[in-house]
Each structure stands twice: as C-alpha cells, then as structure tokens.
C-alpha cells in the first residue's frame, strides 16, 4: 500500500541518514543490527506513529493539535480508572471507551476551530491545559499503579502476533487506514486541497467546517487509542503522563516533510520522521551519549526541516512568479 505522495529526494536523504546512523552504531555495537533490535525500535515507535498519523492530517489543513498528549493522558486515566473499578469489563469495551473519549475531546477542538473560527494553535493550547487539569481532577492527583491496571489493558500492547509485537501490528493498521483515507477517499483528498488553498477549496464546494471537524476528531480518536495502549505498555497512569510528548509528535511530522503551512506532506514521509526519532532514541544509550542530546538533535533537525520546507515552497512558487 502506498502511504501517500512520497517525496523521493527528501525522504531518500533522510533514509540515507538513518541508515548511516544504524551502520555507525552497529559498527560499535553489533547487537544494534539484529532483528530483535529493529523490532524493539519499531515497538518503541509504535505509539508515536499512531499519534503522528492523526497529527499529519491536522497539519495538512494548516492546523495543529497541541492537545494530543493531554488527550492521551486523560483518556488513559479514564480507562485505567474504569478498568480498576470494573475488572471484569472486556478489553473491547475499554478500547471503545478510549476511542469514544478521545474522539469527543478531539471534536471539541474541531468545533472551536471550524465553527467558532478560532486559531488552531490557541484552541489546542487551551484544551491542552484543560485536558491535563481534567486528568488531575479525575484521579485526584493519585497514580493508578501496575497492580490496579486492568489485565486486558496490560496484555494488549505486550502480546506478540507471529513473533511480532501486537503494538506494531496495531500501529501499522492505523497508519495504513489513515493513508488509504487520505489517498483514495474524496474526503481525504479534500483535506489536502483545503490545506493547499482554503479560499479556492471553499469556492470548489469543499465543506470546510465538516472536514476540519473530521480531522480534529480523528486526531483525538487516535490520541485516545494511544492513551489506553500507553497505559497498558507502561502499566501506569498518572497526571503528567506523556507531558510534552506533543512536541515529539510534531517534530516527527516536520522532520518527515509535513509542512506546518499545510497542504504538503504524506503519511509515508511522517513515518520516516518517526523512524528517525526512534533510531536516534535507541542509538544514544548504545553509544553512551547523554539523553539530553536527544532534544538538541531533534531541535536542530526540526529547524533544518522547516528551512527545507520553506525552500521547497519558494522553488515551487518561483516559476509562477517568473511567468507573471
């Protein structure tokens, strides 16, 4: 399955950098080149990939969702509390609950952006704080520890399917479905058109408000799914769960070529950004580099990626200006 319009030069260059990192680290620590190590990197990156799939769709509309980590924390806490109170509830019901709560929280963003016409960065910055505060209120500031986490929640992300972690399979299915929606469904193509030129999209009859509501609801639903999987994987739920992780999500998108100006990027490119972050995170401990360098490296790559995006847009506009 194609994951969107792949940008050969950009993604190929980033893949070459990732390959070089893997080979250099593998030269120093051969264990880094094993299949087990590759699966570990993919497993650690699976939750990020789920969140990135939703964030990519939002960024394509010239929007941004800064509330994904707070949505994740609140949904994860709700599922943890319900699972603790009702240990006999099936895991399917908890998954439905996670998707429902996440979608509702995302839809709040969508309504404020689409109906009230408020700036996405202001809306989601506000709901980021509201959702984080709601997590505290729901838990009264207490943790839900491993012994109180529902058995089904803990088992789901720790199960293997044909020797492949189920978490990777779930992330692959989510990413594939979002990519297919963007590429082959009219609504998905309209999302990209909306980001390319909002005014022209409105004149073309694209329902702007409906599409914006859909993309924020989708981002919220995937954040909710990631919330219950996060709680299960790490067997804990607390107020500051995934605090600041929204920046990592946006970083993966931008590194992968998704433009913050909207209309440019693909799920495939965003996945390359996820892979880059996953490899760097896994490589630093192996070569005994301080994890604090991770933030500096990610920040430098984000600045470079934004510069490359701006350069690509300038080159794309140049022929038009010359013709004019």
Image (tube, rainbow, N blue to C red):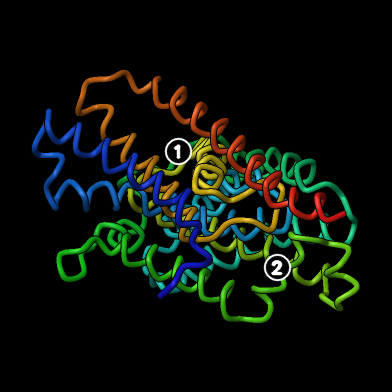
Q: Residues within 10 Å of mark 1 (few under 14, many from 20)?
A: some
Residue 229 occupies which quadrant of the picture? bottom left
Q: Which residue is mark 1?
A: 143
Q: Name the spot of residue 156 as percent of width and height, x first.
A: 31, 63
User: In this view of the protein, which residue sits in the foreground, 45 or 179?
Assistant: 179
- The quarter of the rendered structure image containing the C terminus is bottom right
Q: Name the spot of residue 223 as percent of width and height, x first.
A: 54, 55
- The quarter of the rendered structure image containing the N terminus is bottom left
User: In this view of the protein, which residue sits in the foreground, 124 or 191?
Assistant: 191
Q: Is residue 63 left or right of residue 53?
A: right
Q: Number of callouts in the render?
A: 2
Query: Which circle's residue, 1 or 2, is located before the other in the chain?
Result: 1
Residue 297 occupies which quadrant of the picture? top left
Between disc 1 and disc 2, the foreground one is: 2
Q: Which residue is mark 2?
A: 191
User: In this view of the protein, which residue sits in the foreground, 109 or 131?
Assistant: 109
Q: Is residue 141 left or right of residue 125?
A: left
Residue 2 occupies which quadrant of the picture? bottom left
């Amino acid at each position: 399955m194609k994951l969107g319009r792949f940008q050969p030069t950009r993604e190929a260059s980033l893949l070459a950098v990732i390959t070089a990192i893997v080979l250099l680290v593998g030269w120093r620590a051969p264990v880094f080149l094993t299949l087990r190590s590759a699966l570990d990197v993919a497993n650690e990156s699976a939750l990020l990939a789920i969140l990135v799939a939703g964030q990519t769709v939002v960024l394509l509309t010239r929007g941004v969702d800064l509330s994904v980590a707070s949505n994740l924390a609140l949904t994860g806490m709700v599922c943890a509390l319900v699972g603790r109170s009702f240990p006999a509830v099936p895991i399917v019901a908890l998954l439905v609950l996670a998707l429902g709560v996440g979608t509702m929280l995302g839809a709040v963003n969508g309504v404020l952006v689409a109906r009230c016409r408020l700036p996405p960065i202001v809306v989601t910055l506000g709901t980021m704080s509201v959702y984080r505060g709601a997590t505290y209120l729901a838990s009264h500031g207490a943790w839900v520890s491993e012994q109180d986490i529902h058995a089904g929640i803990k088992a789901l992300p720790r199960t293997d399917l044909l020797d492949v972690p189920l978490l990777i399979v779930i992330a692959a299915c989510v990413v594939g479905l979002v990519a297919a929606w963007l590429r082959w469904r009219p609504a998905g193509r309209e999302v990209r058109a909306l980001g390319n030129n909002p005014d022209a999209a409105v004149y073309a009859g694209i329902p702007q408000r409906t599409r914006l509501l859909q993309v924020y609801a989708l981002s919220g639903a995937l954040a909710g799914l990631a919330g219950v999987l996060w709680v299960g994987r790490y067997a804990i739920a607390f107020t500051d769960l995934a605090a600041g992780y929204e920046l990592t999500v946006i970083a993966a998108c931008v590194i992968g070529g998704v433009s913050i100006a909207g209309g440019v990027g693909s799920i495939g490119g965003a996945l390359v950004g996820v892979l880059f972050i996953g490899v760097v995170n896994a490589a630093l401990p192996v070569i005994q580099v301080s994890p604090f360098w991770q933030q500096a490296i990610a920040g430098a790559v984000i600045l470079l990626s934004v510069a490359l995006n701006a350069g690509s847009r300038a080159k794309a506009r140049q022929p038009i200006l010359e013709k004019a």
